[in-house]
Image: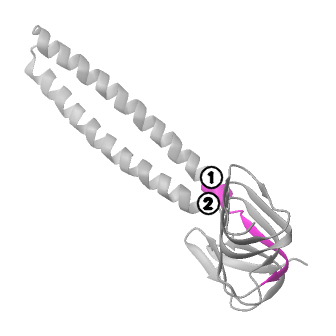
Amino acid sequence: MNQGIVHAGKDLYVENSILHSDITAREQIFCQRGHIIGGRIIGGASIEVRDAGNRMNTKTEIVLGLNYLLEEKKQQLFNTKQELNEKKEKLLILGNELKARGYTNNPKIRIMELKQKNSLLIVNKQLEDINQLLLEIGFEEDKNREASLVVRNNLYANVTVAFGKYQRTIDANQHYVKVSLKDNEVNILPLF
């Protein structure tokens, strides 16, 4: 694959090499007989490759764990949650003011009270949904901590391996290694 753009919903199997391409796979990328040279490769769970980079030290970026997608989604959910909490606070204040006036016989105020209660129920349901999504993202983040890069031959210099905000640029050639995140540090361990 040369200068391609691929987004896979699950796994991606590459027969030969990935050259200067933008590749994203939600789960695993397998390129066991070929090379990854140049471009940006993003794998959710793991990437297995024969060689990463090349002898010419071509800049290659390998991102694991899809943390950047989760962070964007998480930030959007936090913003929405904050807006809903503000809306909920306003609805509660409105409800208290309507009760304090005591015009329960007035049909217009009664209708306004019912609309306020219905709006409050809707906002509470939306908040529950957002809290559930945030909980699921927390589980995804835990799962992504197990992501790894396995290089079966050479990991060349000038390859950047990133796990969310933690990244490491390889400064010397490595052979037969596994790159993973442990205790918020990018570790390179031998396969044997």
Give the Cα distance between marks 2 and 1.
9 Å
Q: Decide if residue 104 is in sight here.
A: no
Where residue 16 sits, quadrant-wise, is bottom right
Q: Position of residue 97 (x, y in %)?
A: 13, 28
- Which of the two residues, 2 or 97, is positioned nearer the viewer here? 2
Q: Residue at x 11, y 24 (%)?
A: 100
Amino acid found under the numbered disc labelled 2: Leu
Task: Specify the farthest residue to the right.
Answer: 192
Count neighbours of disc 2 (C-alpha within 10 A) and say few if under 14, some if 14 to 19, many if 20 or more: many
The disc placed on residue 140 is 1
Amino acid found under the numbered disc labelled 1: Glu
Q: Quadrant of the C terminus?
A: bottom right
Kindly identify which residue carries mark 2: 66
Q: Of helix, strand and loop, which one carries label 1?
A: helix
Where residue 28 sits, quadrant-wise, is bottom right
Where residue 2 sits, quadrant-wise, is bottom right
- 74 within the magenta span: no
Is the residue under label 1 in contact with that under label 2 (CB below 8 Å)? yes
- Is residue 138 positioned above or below 23 on the image? above
For the record, the magenta segment spans 141-155
Q: Residue at x 36, y 27 (%)?
A: 122
Q: Position of residue 191 (x, y in %)?
A: 87, 77
- Which of the two residues, 3 or 130, is positioned nearer the viewer here? 3
Q: Residue at x 33, y 47 (%)?
A: 82
The disc placed on residue 106 is none
Q: Decide if residue 177 is in sight here.
A: yes
Count of picture labels:
2
